[in-house]
Image (spheres, rainbow, N blue to C red):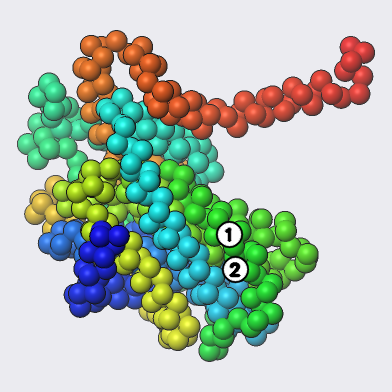
Amino acid sequence: MEGFLSGLSMILDPYMILVIIIGTVGGVLVGILPGLSSTMATALLLPFTVTMEPAAAISLLAALYCAGTYGGSITAILINAPGAPPAAATALDGYPMALRGEAGRALGIATISSCIGGIFSVLVLMVAAPLLARVAYKFGAPEYFALAVFGLSMLASISGQSSVKNLIGGAFGVLISTVGVDFTTSVERFTFGLPELTDGIHFIPVMIGLFGGAELLTQSATLDLIYKRVAAVAVRLPSREDFRKVRGVIARSCGIGTFIGILPAEGGTVAAMIAYNEAKRWSREKDQFGKGAIEGIAGPEAANNAATGGAMVPTLALGIPGSATTAVILGALMVHGLRPGPHLFAEQPHMLYAIFIAMLVANVLFMGLGLVGAKVFARVTLIPRTFLWPSVFVLAVVGSYALSQSLLDVWIMLIFGILGFVLRRYDFSPAPIIMGLILGELVENTLKQSLLIFEHNWLLFFERPIVIVFFVLTVLGLFGATVGRAVFACLRRNTMPGSFEK
């Protein structure tokens, strides 16, 4: 309670309130603009938060994360162009509703569902993260190594169509993390004689390049694309009948979104798709889905916003990102000299509760902004892309240079921007690379520490119960689906008619 009250007193400071408002408004604007995303926006904004106080910086990024997830629903409904990937499922029924003249009703349902999902997940975050951090007190170097390996194994399902490609991307990120001087042997690795690389490759220019630079090149091919727009009317609050129809969907989707968000490497897009499928499965009017069913809006919006708080649970409690955006927020914590985990909860609980409360405030703020100003915000989509994306490029260059005042970081950003563009053409997602880069150092350092503790007898890993649990989860995460399909096929073959005679 003392930490909560201290965090509340920090949030009541006018400066902090202004920071949260800026983050929320910026997040809605970013979410609305097709092509931009909260992940890319946080990556671009991160270098400019270095001079801020840690609580203010993380609160700003967290508010942008929450509001950006909601903002995508506005353009998904009005122009059938999800401003953010998690809003893709919302467009399936939101746009048909708008076409038949119910844009205001659709926006109202999306706004209320998003707010409920976001608040629910933050309340879970406030309870679950401290409990998980207490469990982490029992972790030593071997446990953190097993946890990091488990986090890397979850990259198989983070995004894209191919698990193998995601794992290749994660492995490439781990390889990048080895650049620089080995802290145990003082041997230079992959520096190619450049003194600037002895400290390794900073993840900030890599993130800006993979998310911002690659998106800039991708969007350059769609500058002449014209969206069919629906005239937005005033946002209308859901009626009592609408609430009665979607309350079960919202409750179920809040649970789905929070649970999916807590899983390392999952995120709002996965949660929204699962919630949409579940809403359709439990609906009595399945034939209305895809034609403008309000459950098809309420489910995805509650789930993708619930995933924001859920994704912060492993990020803050264990230092394992729950999504691509929380990977950036984890990077921001490290830039400010903070290492997520049990010690952070013990030493600076007031700052963490300030972040929790900032996310709550952001969810309430974007609800007000959505109900009052969705029509105004939607006009942001009228900004010509020929002006928007060059501005993004300038921010990417300035942000890359600002961190260390090094032109090498700008070149790294440009190189990874081109690399990210090429990888996207072959269906490689940038998120696994970033997570591999962040987790790679943890994997390497904890492995070396563990082997020193075990006097290089790696079999001692299997004498620690928590390590065994994470290793089992890793194997299940990588091969569980394959083994399950094989077992199912075997059982099916054995139970087919005539199998017993054979």
Which residue is drawn at the image coordinates 37% and 63% (left, top)? 65
Among numbered discs 1 and 2, the one appearing first in the sequence: 1
Q: Between marks 1 and 2, how big is the CA–CA gap?
A: 8 Å
- Judging by the rendered image, the residue that carries numbered circle 1 is 253
Which residue is drawn at the image coordinates 9% and 31% (left, top)? 193
Q: Nearer the viewer, residue 38 or 13?
A: 13
Rendered-image quadrant of the C terminus: top right
Residue at the extreme front of the image, as rendered: 1
Which residue is drawn at the image coordinates 60% and 53% (left, top)? 274
Which residue is drawn at the image coordinates 58% and 76% (left, top)? 109
Is mark 1 in CB contact (under 8 Å) with mark 2? yes
- Count how many numbered circles sit on residues in the image: 2
Q: Tell me if residue 423 comes above or below residue 88 in the rendering.
A: above
Whole-percent x and y of residue 500?
A: 89, 15
Does 286 sit left or right of 16 as displayed? Answer: right
* Amino acid type, mark 1: Ser
Whole-percent x and y of residue 62?
A: 32, 62
Whole-percent x and y of residue 77?
A: 56, 74
Whole-percent x and y of residue 168?
A: 41, 33
Rendered-image quadrant of the N terminus: bottom left
Which element is circle 1 on? helix
Quadrant of the image occupied by residue 301 = bottom right
- Judging by the rendered image, the residue that carries numbered circle 2 is 298
Label 1 environment density (alpha carbons within 10 Å; few <14, some 14–19, many ≥20): many
Q: Tell me if residue 157 comes above or below residue 406 in the rendering.
A: above
Which element is circle 2 on? helix
